[in-house]
Image: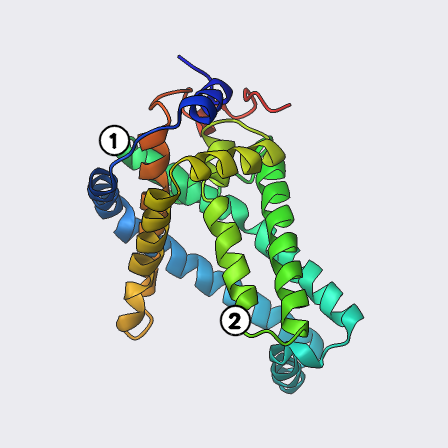
Amino acid sequence: MKSTRDQIEDIKRDGYSIDFAVIFGYAFENYKKIALYSALVIAVFTFIVFCAVMGLATAFYGLQAILSDFTNVLDFQKLNYGQQILSTIFVSVFVALFSPLGAGFLEIADRADKGEKFDFGSVFAYYKQPYFLQLFSAALILALVSNGISTIIDNLGIAYVGIGVSIVISYFTFFTIPLIIFGNLPAIEAIKSSLIVVSKSPFTIFALFVVGFLCSLTGVIGCCIGIIFTIVFNTSITYSTYYAIFEEQQQPDSIDFIGKSDFE
């Protein structure tokens, strides 16, 4: 069985072919297997995190101070350059800390696809080494680059371009997380490899990227609550696209073999 690195070299040399309709259908079937359970996990986790954060913040600062500071933070351009840099770093680190959660939902998608059991702990499985460091590093790099560029553009007074840059970065790094957890690639190599894979079939990948994003947001129609049921559709799209490109079963079950990866 070819390694992920060998397959990347093949893709770099020969490209690959994928079918939008086949991937979408496969993703929808995968989504039906994980939607309800994922929604429950998201709802419980969000509630716990919200209560914990608000409880700690209220205890330290008081509710009135929190609401006042939150209003000021929303107006990002009122911050001086030093505060903007600190805010960018803080947000990037915060986002990076939650990146193993996204990997956890991919793990659930993988187990559901293979007919294996999964539970609440599966979502947090990648908060273990060697995967946590790679996931955190990749997410931190991408968040710093994306948020940094967006901040610079916003300070120049160019509206909406910063959001566009963030979307483009997310698009070209579409496969970064699955390449880390399923392909056992280190952070930097996973980012570079994702750029290669996307660039070899940009239009089909873009269509899947957009459809996955839009379908994930359809839950907003249901008074925003429905989004907890639809948001994981993007996970199924990512999973199905990855396995349509790379050979299935290219490695042993990823999380069961934690500590036996090829990270260098």
Q: Residue at x 46, y 49 (%)?
A: 171
- Sequence-earlier tag: 1 or 2: 1
Question: Which residue is pictured at 29% across the width and 34% down the height?
Answer: 18
Q: Residue furthest right?
A: 82
- Residue wearing tag 2: 160
Local secondary structure at mark 2: loop
Residue at which label 1 appears: 115
The residue tagged with tag 1: helix, strand or loop? loop
Residue 215, quarter of picture: bottom left
Q: Residue at x 39, y 27 (%)?
A: 15
Amino acid type of the residue that numbered disc 2 sits on in the rendered structure = Tyr
Q: Amino acid at mark 1?
A: Gly
Q: Do the residues under discs 1 and 2 have CB atoms within 8 angstroms?
A: no
Does residue 162 lie above or below 258 as drawn?
Answer: below
Q: Quadrant of the C terminus?
A: top right
> What distance separates the C-alpha of mark 1 from that of mark 2?
43 Å
Residue 118 visible in the current orientation: no
Task: Point out residue 108 in the picture as x, y percentages from the top left corner.
Answer: 36, 40
Is 202 left, or right, of 223 in this rendering?
Answer: right
Q: Nearer the viewer, residue 126 or 188?
A: 188
User: Which quadrant holds the N terminus?
Assistant: top left
What colour scheme governs how the chains and residues are painted in the rendered image of this protein? Answer: rainbow
Indicate which label's residue lies in the foreground, 1 or 2: 2
